[in-house]
Amino acid sequence: MITFLIGLVILLGGGFLYGSFCEHVFGPDDRETPAYAKQDGIDYVPMKTWRNSLINLLNIAGTGPIMGPIQGILFGPIAFLAIPIGNVIGGSMHDYFSGMICTRDGGTQMPDFIKNYTNKFVFVLYDIFICILLLLVGAVFIYTPGDIAATQLFGFSGAATAPSTWIIYGVIFAYYLIATCLPIDKVIGRIYPIFGVILVLSAVGIFIAIFTHGWHLTNIWDSWNTVGLYAADGGFDFGTYFGGSPFAGHHFIPIFFVTVACGILSGFHSTQTALVSRTIESEKAGKMTFYNMMIVEGFIAMCWAAGTMAVINMGAAAGGVTMQSADNGVTWQFFANVGGQLTAVSATSVVGVICKQALGSVAGKVAILGVIILPITSGDTALRGLRLTLADSLHIRQENNAQRLGLAAPVFALVVVILAWAKFDPNGFNVLWRYFAWSNQMISLFALACIAIWMMVNKKAQYVWMPLIPAAFYAFVTCSFIMQAKVGFNLPWPAAYTVGAVFTIAYLILVVVGGRKKAAGKAAA
């Protein structure tokens, strides 16, 4: 419990201090925002700060801050420190500067943001990556809420061959199509605040249950059920977290930071803050809308990580879950007591266990509803963002519903193909999730590089360490992961780490050199 509380202090206290520092560095003023300067009644629409904040929270908080911590808690209580530290200095900073720079540049979307601060090659590379990521987001955020709704809310099997599964998917698809094509204030602006309240109350309910139910949360200096990450005597062993013998298969870096993306740092968020940059009424609302909402997502991730740890410590026999090693600690499987028998369950089923244990049957259903809403309200804006990205890149007009539907149709067809594969392949979702998370983190390198270059161009080079520290870390994480992954380059870990280190150095050099060239070009103009 103490480790969890320390993490909350870091998240809230550190977020308050570092958020104020980020605001000081950027320097918001009273200039007219794009919501007024370019008001069009569709995407450029002024909305109140409280409404924008809830919209942005729901845009960024998909199943990432739930499913990521549920799977990432394999690594034990170190998650309670890694999540808040990464959130404060990485994710929240990334979201704030991405949103604010897009606002100041006239409500630009991320492709133009990348184009303005890098070069044509990087821009094309980003366009390819972002389209792939947004497609994966759309598929993941139909799969997970659909399955949770089917199994935890309606009591269906959730099987790929069950008609009920595809009916639920179809309902989500229909909503996505409406939200993707209609003006932002007609659907998103009206219903998101209601969803936002349910979302926050779900996380708060789990947070309260941790204390009122007396749930046991393991501290970093205690033993943990997945003992493969600890020394033989059950204590903390720093070396094993970083791939040291004898449990090198776990590799806290990079695997934890690919598994737990949202809640720490997510490249997807920059695409969503760019959308909101067109609706905020004042630059001074940016800290609440962008930085603080990422802190809230970190709180959600902390609560779900704690809830998962609590039901694991509770054990399946007492109504919780048990984690068992599938192959000498390399992979782990959740088990729950189903009909008196210990049965393997998915991570989505763990959501239902936590909600039931925390809030009871009735309130637990409401919490599950919040979990279902969470990814849906990110998936729709992801597909909306993909439509806008394709429209901008391919110069396709989007002035009426027919034009918007014409571009949305092939996008949705691709999502259906990905979804069907993930559902019918026994290991499909695991692969889909891991590479959704990897591409999610990879995309952040583009935004962090542009933030650093923007600082150099705007005479703030003394602060360039702010984006470059998380950028260097995630350059190493994403590169070393894909180098080692079986569906990547399948290199042994020492080689993967070496390539990751070289890539990180090259990335930093290119960012600094590019920033200096941009700054020199502006000074000479």
Image: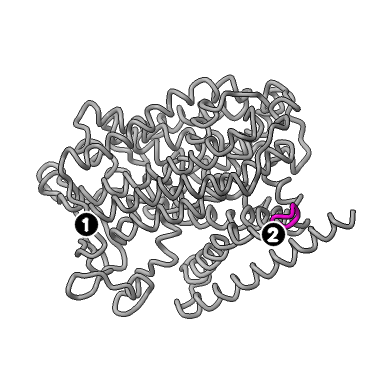
Single out the mark in the foreground, 1 or 2: 2
Which comes before the other along the chain, label 1 or label 2? Answer: 1
Span of residues in magenta: 456-461
Pinpoint residue 263: horizontal percent, then vertical percent. Answer: 43, 48
What colouring style does the render use?
one colour
Up/down of 511 relative to 391, above or below:
below
Kindly identify the amino acid type of the residue bearing the numbered disc 1.
Answer: Thr
Up/down of 401 relative to 115, above or below:
above
Which of the 4 image quarters holds residue 354? top left
What residue do we see at 48% from left, 71% from top? 484
Q: Nearer the viewer, residue 173 or 120?
A: 120
Kindly identify the amino acid type of the residue bearing the numbered disc 2.
Answer: Ala
Magenta-colored stretch includes residue 459: yes
Magenta-colored stretch includes residue 163: no
- Image disc number at residue 461: 2
Question: Which residue, given by chain and number where applicable, does mark 1 sit on?
Answer: 218
Q: Residues within 10 Å of mark 1 (few under 14, many from 20)?
A: many
Pinpoint residue 310: horizontal percent, then vertical percent. Answer: 21, 49
> In the image, is 138 to the left or to the right of 346?
right
> In the image, is 395 to the left or to the right of 312?
right
Which of the 4 image quarters holds residue 125? bottom right
* C-alpha gap between disc 1 and disc 2: 42 Å
